[in-house]
Amino acid sequence: VLTKIDKYHYKVYLFNKDGHLFHRFILEECLVLCSPIITDDNKLLVLAAARNDPKCCEFQIYNTDGTFTSKSIEEDILEEPKDITVANDGHFMVLNNNGHVIVLDANGNHLSKLDFNHADQSLVEATAFHSESNHVAVSSLESGFRVKISIYDDRRDRVLIIHQGGKDIDENEQKECVPPKIAVAKNGNIAVLTGIVGECEVTVV
């Protein structure tokens, strides 16, 4: 769990599968760009920008004791990144704000850019990768806090659209939407976090 102390300082709480806290530490001073992830070798990976240069991005890879190494990412590759997920072969996929997915290796080197057919070009929020099928899921936010999840195959064609959530909100109410997050299990089920601040839910589809 990542908590924000102020704009450039964050604290991480690590829990085991039983929900028991086993470690906590403060990240190095930075601007966290999206939710951190756990790598295949059980390390915490943070996509961050330097305080003195927001365009300079890097991977911060933390051990469970808080020690870390950093890997610089090539400049001008990432454009307002929204989310990051683990792909095959130790690679990572970063979802840009424009809907493009950037594939990087563990050292931050740019490998490829995925331009999906019929992709949403705005309001994208999260991505997830299903290693068994090589499918990529991208969620986007629609009106009424409704979430659309687009599934793309390895030919970059959209093969499935799932709509999830949605609330009837009075236009006069000041409600803040929680950015929807998704995760894909090995069996292909997708966990979807939706809702507004104070009224969130996780649904498995």
Image: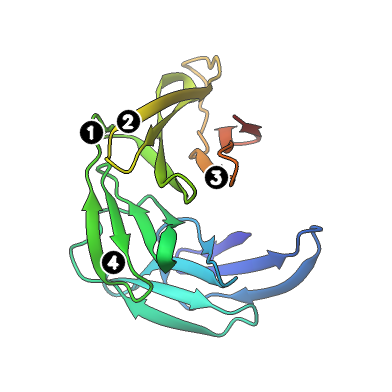
Q: Quadrant of residue 119?
A: top left
- For marks 2 and 3, give the CA distance: 18 Å
Element on which disc 1 rests: loop
Q: Nearer the viewer, mark 1 or mark 4?
A: 1
Q: Nearer the viewer, mark 4 or mark 2?
A: 2
Q: Quadrant of residue 49?
A: bottom left
Name the residue: 39% across, 72% down.
59
Amino acid carrying label 2: it is Arg
Would residue 200 be visible to someone looking at this image?
no
What residue does disc 3 label? 183
Work out whether mark 3 precedes mark 1 in sequence or the reverse, and give the earlier one.
1
Element on which disc 2 rests: strand
Name the residue: 22% across, 53% down.
113
Is 81 left or right of 15, judged from the image as shown?
left
What residue does disc 4 label? 54
Tell me: residue 118, above or below residue 169.
below
Amino acid carrying label 4: it is Pro
Name the residue: 48% across, 22% down.
163
Q: Nearer the viewer, mark 3 or mark 1?
A: 1
Element on which disc 4 rests: loop
Question: Residue 7 placed where, x, y %?
Answer: 45, 63
Would residue 123 be visible to someone looking at this image?
yes
Tell me which colouring the rendered structure shows.
rainbow
Residues at badges 1 and 2 in contact (C-beta under 8 Å)?
yes
Q: Which mark is drawn over residue 158?
A: 2
Work out whether mark 1 precedes mark 2 in sequence or the reverse, and give the earlier one.
1
- For marks 4 and 2, give the CA distance: 33 Å
Q: Which mark is drawn over residue 117?
A: 1
Q: Residues within 10 Å of mark 3 (few under 14, many from 20)?
A: some
Is 155 left or right of 187, judged from the image as shown?
left
